[in-house]
Amino acid sequence: MAVSDCNAVGARLLLGLAVLAVGYGMLAPAPPPLPGFEQSDKLAHFLAFLTLSALADIGWPQRGFDLRKFLPLLVYAGAVEGLQHFVPGRDLSVWDLLANVLGIAAYAWLAMPLLRRMALR
């Protein structure tokens, strides 16, 4: 099933909102972690960039998930992580950056082929 023009525009709008939400979530001062969930932050990073990747891919369906989609997401992942160094209670974390990159890669190498096999993308 091909992505309609209306769905592509909707995905672009959602991508813009998601970029703002992810940026706010990652750059707001960090609340203290819940006991037993200290590493849940890595899962949040992974899921955020998996979602951003899906929205970027659906928003421009005429292109594959190539460098024109992958590279801006990668730059955004690095920029947000680098800016965390300047936010009180946050710090630059290579593990968070890795979770971001793995979220993008998981979409490119796992989710997108699955969606194509199911004829959804």
Image (cartoon, rainbow, N blue to C red):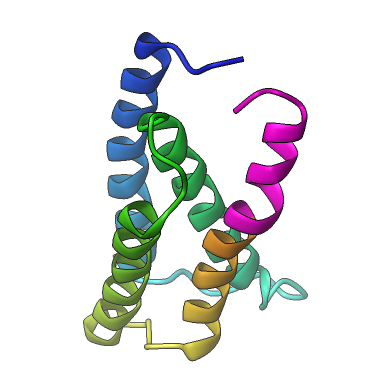
Between 88 and 91, the one lying in front of the other is 91
- In which quadrant of the rendered image does the C terminus lie? top right
Q: Judge left or right: residue 106 versus residue 48.
A: right
- The image position of residue 14, as x and y in percent, is 36, 30
Label count reads 0
Q: Which residue appears at 35% of the width and 32% of the height?
A: 60
Q: Is residue 115 magenta?
A: yes
User: In the shown orientation, is residue 54 left or right of residue 12?
Assistant: right
Residue occupying the point 29% across, 70% down? 75
- Please check the rendered image and state whether residue 18 is part of the magenta-colored stretch, yes or no: no
Q: Name the residue nearer the viewer: 72 or 22.
A: 72
Q: Main secondary structure of the magenta part?
A: helix
Residue 5, position in %: x, y? 35, 12
Quick check: 73 above or below 18?
A: below
**Residue shown at the point (38%, 88%) measured from the top left:** 92
Quarter where residue 119 is shown: top right
**Quadrant the N terminus occupies:** top right
Q: Residue at x 38, y 30 (%)?
A: 62
Q: Is residue 25 above or below residue 27?
A: above
Q: Position of residue 101 (x, y in %)?
A: 51, 71
Percent x, y of residue 106: 64, 59
Vertical arrangement, residue 104 with respect to residue 64, above or below: below
> Would you place residue 30 above or below residue 92 in this image?
above
Residue 3 left/right relative to 15: right
Residue 40 figure quarter: bottom right
**Magenta residue span:** 107-121
